[in-house]
Image (cartoon, rainbow, N blue to C red):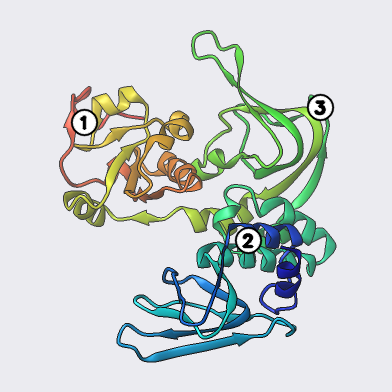
Amino acid sequence: MTSVATKLKNSSMFSRISEAALASLIENAIQVSGEASARISARPADVIIVLDGGIEMKSREGKLLARVNADRGAGEPGVLHAVPPGAHLTLTRKSDVLVVDGAVLDEVLSHAHQNHSIASLEDGVGSRVASLIHTQPFTQMTLDQICHCAEAMTRRAVNAGEDVIRYAGTGDAFYVIETGEAEVWRPDPRNGQPVKVATLSAGACFGEEALLRGGLRNATVRMSKPGSLLCLAVSDFDQLIASHFVNEISPDIANSMVSRRQAELIDCRYDDEHAAWRIPGSRSMPLESVRSQALQLDKGRSYIVYCRTGKRSRAAAFLMRQLGLTATVLRGGMAEWPYAIEGIRDDEHGVPSL
């Protein structure tokens, strides 16, 4: 493996890949040795690396598409970058080749490019990008978008026992835990006493719900271990993150998509609100339970989230998008829904007050 890795490292394509990533790539590749005229099996989009020898690729009709050669004494291997569907691969002489999964190679090269790009950034921005790049929701953003977020963020040192946000306080920032640990406390609805509902470690983010709903904080987040936070002001959050994850569609488009079974409706109000008045066929998933219940949803489907006016559904759709789901917001919520609704009226004016 050492000689193979050394030869690949001399190639411009593999020169920026770390030794560990390159070793893993080689380990998971298929290494084939054969004589002239031997056939090589490969899938479309696989990458063929000729370490020594030669290979030619012909179309299904027998037309020559490419020929690659490499000598063991040469500085670089020969690379056949893609295998079209139906192509035939044949060794032209005694050869040693690697068949590499193209999707895996692209992922490794993309990661290497990101690391190289981060290393070239100004120290403060680069360290913030390095903290964000593997953290939700930033894993679904481009490197350029992450850089813009990192440039707008500030770093804040925090102590154990410090309340970063307080229940019923005004939402003014979005936070990412860079180092340290925090606890989430909410009042028990039965007696009002604070109850710990979650522990957040490095890489976790919080504070987005109040920003998306435009309301007050629904929990207290208290540091249980000292560390540092990356903070993004509400105006930057709206411009750089929320606009990327929260999309709205009109009632007309939503009704058409649901009618054609192109999307499913999610009601993020409380269960009793859903029972009283709802859009037919919608599934109840209260905002407070989205993080857990949405894990059971099919990532191959599209979802349209609604509430009374569209504020809570913005937060719910954002959380669902973080989980890799396709979720949009019903513009205006039930208040602007002109189509069928069902349930039990609890007042003479129709939709219950929320």
- The residue that appears at 42% across and 47% down in the rendered structure is 325
Q: Give 54 or 166, whichever is nearer the viewer.
A: 54
**Does label 2 or label 3 sit earlier along the sequence?**
2
Q: Residue placed at 80% from the left, 44% from the top?
A: 156
Quarter placement of the N terminus:
bottom right
- Structural crowding at the residue carrying mark 1, measured as other residues with C-alpha within 10 Å and reported as few (<14), some (14–19) or many (≥20): few
Q: Nearer the viewer, mark 2 or mark 3?
A: 2
Check whether the beta carbons of the residues at disc 2 and disc 1 lie within 8 A of each other. no
Count of picture labels = 3
Can you identify the residue that label 2 sits on?
Answer: 25
The answer to which of 204 and 36 lies nearer the viewer is 36
Quadrant containing the C terminus in the rendered view: top left
Contact between labelled residues 3 and 2, with CB atoms less than 8 Å apart: no
In the structure shown, which secondary structural element does the residue marked by tag 2 occupy?
helix
Percent x, y for residue 127?
79, 56
The residue wearing badge 1 is: 349
Amino acid at pointer 3: Ala
Closer-to-camera residue (131/165):
131
Q: Which residue is mark 3?
A: 160
Disc 2 to disc 1, how far (Cα)? 65 Å
The residue that appears at 21% across and 49% down in the rendered structure is 258
**Amino acid at the residue labelled 1:** His
Q: Quick one: which residue is furthest to the top in this view?
A: 191
Of callouts 1 and 3, which one flags the residue occurring earlier in the amino acid sequence? 3
Looking at the image, which is closer to me, 328 or 164?
328
Q: Which mark is residue 334?
A: none
Q: Looking at the picture, which amino acid does disc 2 mark?
A: Leu
Q: Is residue 108 left or right of residue 315?
A: right
